[in-house]
Image (spheres, rainbow, N blue to C red):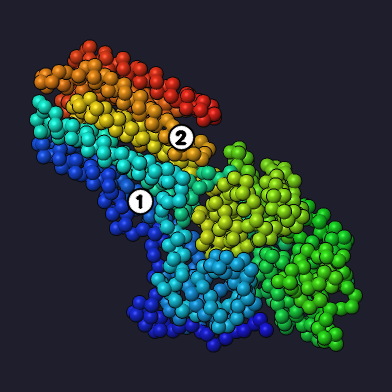
Amino acid sequence: MRVTVDVACTGLSTAEVAERVAAGHVNTLPPRSGRTVWDIVRTNVFTRINALLLVLFVLVLITGDLLQGLWGFLIIVNSGIGIVQELRAKHTLDNLAIVGEGKPRVRRDGLTAELPREQVVLDDIIEIGPGDQIVVDGELVETSYLEIDESLLTGESDPVEKSVGDEVMSGSFVVAGIGAFRATRVGSDSYAAQLTAAANKFSLTKSELQSGINVILRVLGWVLVPVGALTAWVQWNLPHDTWQQAMLRMAGALVAMVPEGLVLLTALAFALAVVRLGKVNVLVQELPAVEGLARVDVVCADKTGTLTENGLRFRELITCGPLDEDACRAALGQLVAADITPNASAQAIAEEMGAPDAPWEVGQRWPFTSAKKWSAATLTAPGAGPVTWMLGAPDVLAAPDSPVAGQAGQLGASGGRVLLFGRLTVSESEGGQPPSNPRPFPSGSHPVADADLAGPPGFGADDPNAPTPEPLALVVLDQRLRPEARDTLAYFASQDVALKVISGDNAQSVGAVVQSLGVMTGAVVDARTLPEDPAAFAEAVESGEVFGRVTPAQKRQMIAALQSRGHNVAMTGDGVNDVLAIKDADLGVAMGSGASATRGVAQVVLLDDSFATLPSVVAEGRQVLGNIERVANFFLTKTVYSILLGVLTVIWRVPFPFVPINLTPIGWFTIGIPATLLALAPNRERARPGFLKRVLRFGIPAGMVVSVTTFTTYLTVLPAAGSAHDLWVQASTATLFTLLLGGVWVMIVIARPYRWWKIGMIAVCLVGYPVISLIPLGRSVFRLDPSNQPMMLTGLLCGLVAIVLVEALWWLDGRLAHERRHLWTVE
């Protein structure tokens, strides 16, 4: 017997709850964003870069020249901006997670109420139904046809039938039936704590972008140590320099080598993306999801809840059997009223039929599942014998060549959802066997012949040659299209993102709905006809656009097939049947009103259920990826030319050309201002793999060009040992001019294709340095002297050479990458 109910489980009393709270037996969970405030502060302040800058800052202060230490405020600025933005993102994530998370139904003092997960205590009685995720570990005390999917824990996709006394583990979810369990492990003792930490972690890991940046930083870290040590040794051992001058030149060399803003701007771009997405009701449960959807080139969307609204409307009832419409309505109303976990179809029918005045006696039930696509119940009306009534897909319950199947197909082609209502009469004299006038399927043709999907006695799922339900009526329901669906599909089409609509509904019905949007015109595929051979299956999935009668297992197969073809796949859905496919996809997207299990495994949750929000997520991801790639080019070029300048000064055993204050304008006009603006600017470029390769391909040669031309100027204008201090300042200014021209041109080519605001940014950066160098206060503060015209002319000529070579590198890089380069944005 599948029904075992302990009606005595009224739950804990208020006093018992208070006792457990006082004892600490509460479901305390990790922070929703995975990071505490202290974690954020620590990771932004106590970094290797900050440590190096702090040591150099202290050494500069020892010289007594406080202006030379102005760059030390980078430590405060870097850490402060990073902390503020991550705290904003954490606050956004935490608030959205509270809205988006499922609340367990907890029974206390005999009453049931939805409570936040953190308020669950040990021994609480928690009620569960289809789509609910088990939030804590426990032991079942009530079950009614309860089936739980434990695939997220065990990898086994088949639902497990549960009885009273069985254990349930957090992370599993209910597929069918209802029940209640007593919480036996809560808080850190429960698997739910680990699940929450993994699902909602605020992290920059597992992304190509962050991995590439980590590689760059790791390599630079190894290079900086020997180069920095040699540079410091040379500067300390040069004759005719005071120890203060040697200290400042050493600090100038080492500060320039540190890519201090790269990590900051990367974290800033991701954090701001989370905040912006939060404003449009998008919960990013894993930060790499921002990058992930930008890389997606195939979106698999479940029709229901994505293209159509969750609710259905009753259209009509068409009788096709011996019962008249009134009798069909009465029986159908009794059947849906007996359903303890009605789905959207049953709810729409129940709303039309109304609650029955005198419910019939309910015998055995067979709840609806996405795998078998029907539900049934044995009901006994007053003065009559038991009858098993069935409601489900016509192409599952009716013979393919029957008139009712043909009629259902015609109705489905109009876009409606069509269900077949039928019956199996069970006679005691026949020992519970089906009637003797069967409507058999041809041998082996029944679409549901799996023993795991066994139905009522005599139903064809037990035996392909056994009777099918006697058709009584076709129920037609209307599916309401989401108003934003057309524009969203058109957006994906314009962005070269392929869309696959996969649904468990009738293929013709799904095709009619999709084609009514006027965007997709691909052939409609009945998933039951897909080939079993993996290669042929993958080919069919890639070439098709609309798929109907897809089982949950096939959804997973489709995701795997597309991934095997090199695609980055996103899966959107809202039902419990979408959970495994969402988990397997490169990016899982769930609807906010969907099953809690679906939200639990998704990386992105659309809290307002709006499919139209997906383009916003794509845009944010592309903005982050494209902009951080530009910023990485800035910092890599700057670090390369700084390291090479240090190496060249070591080889020639000459003073480093700059002191720290000289480099401040360079930091402003070639890195700081443009990098900040470009990191946060709109960017619609499609994400591409190969981030690290592209950055290295341009950044290293560009850095070499800037360093060689800059050092050439320096050697040309280098004063003789023991020359006047003013002459050294003039030589440094001319050398800085070459560095500025080369660095600015790197910024100019990286900023392409141009928009008008980028032209304004470039103009500010080009004008800024001359203005500073011509104003007496600027010359005094930044230790500049452009009065030596021959030296400045040398700096200009070498700077022009740098411009030409950087420009040539940019075009050559495009040629090698087979990319068509544009000077202006092509709309």
780 left or right of 5?
Answer: left
Residue nearest the viewer, comparing 317 with 680: 680
Residue nearest the viewer, comparing 611 with 633: 633
Q: Amino acid at mark 2?
A: Arg
Marks 1/2: CA–CA distance:
28 Å
Q: Amino acid at mark 1?
A: Glu
| Circles 1 and 2 in contact, beta carbons < 8 Å | no
Secondary-structure class at tag 1? helix
For the N terminus, which image quadrant? bottom right
639 left or right of 321?
Answer: left
Secondary-structure class at tag 2? helix
What residue sits 17% from the left and 31% below the top? 235
Tell me the tag on residue 647: none
The residue to which callout 1 is attached is 86
What residue sits 42% from the left and 77% below the top? 121
Residue nearest the viewer, comparing 316 with 137: 137
Q: Nearer the viewer, mark 1 or mark 2?
A: 2
